[in-house]
Image (cartoon, rainbow, N blue to C red):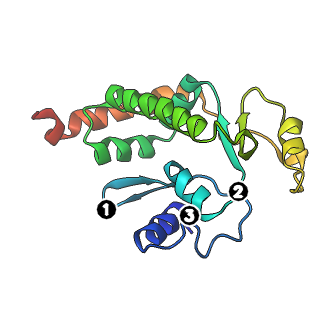
Amino acid sequence: MNLARVMKNNLDAGRKPLHRIDHYAFLSDLECFEEGKIWSGFLHFREIDAAYPGTKFLLNIREKDNWLQSRLHHRRYAQRFIEAHNLSGIDACLAMWSADWDRHLADVRSYFSDRPDDLITFNIDDDDIDDLIAQLPDFTLDRNAWGHIGQSNPEHVARNRAALDAFVIERSDLNEV
């Protein structure tokens, strides 16, 4: 099940964003590509908050450059993003991602500024998992299940970046502009 697609369809139909999936305790990876467009469910935190009062939000962060490199690790994701936004190449993509990062963090922090207990910010690279577990006492979280899966390998990122550059060069619709 693609949670982002479910959320999009629910909002489009005038339903609560998590209709039929609101029994889940945690939701993540809330993006989908549909008909050449990207839809990002995480941007709809206001709608989720309005529909589900008392919800705790977890904002995972890390150094922005690490996040950008991680996104490049998923070559097909970057290709689809470039296509969806009709970008001129990987540098334009990285610039857009960087601006999106800054805007999203500012929006989330501003929105929750008067309700700090409803937002938990966790740096996935630097913060101690035990601190996060302590902030979520209503959940049974196993610190031994914590880890980093799919960590970006610099060589893999470099190969993907080269492949993305070649992908953009081959797109005649972008080269004609």
Residue, x 72% and y 46% (percent of image)? 118
Residue, x 51% and y 53% (percent of image)? 44
Does label 3 or label 1 sit earlier along the sequence? 3
Front tag of 2 and 3: 2
84 horizontally vs 118: left or right: left
Does label 1 or label 2 sit earlier along the sequence? 1
Q: Secondary structure at mark 1?
A: loop
Q: Which residue is mark 3?
A: 3
Q: Position of residue 139 (x, y in %)?
A: 86, 56
Verify CB contact (< 8 Å) between mark 2 and mark 3.
no
Q: Which residue is mark 2?
A: 55
Q: Which residue is mark 1?
A: 35
Question: Which amino acid, mark 2?
Answer: Thr
115 horizontally vs 145: left or right: left
Front tag of 3 and 1: 3
26 horizontally vs 84: left or right: right
Residue nearest the viewer, comparing 119 with 87: 119
Q: Position of residue 32 (x, y in %)?
A: 46, 57
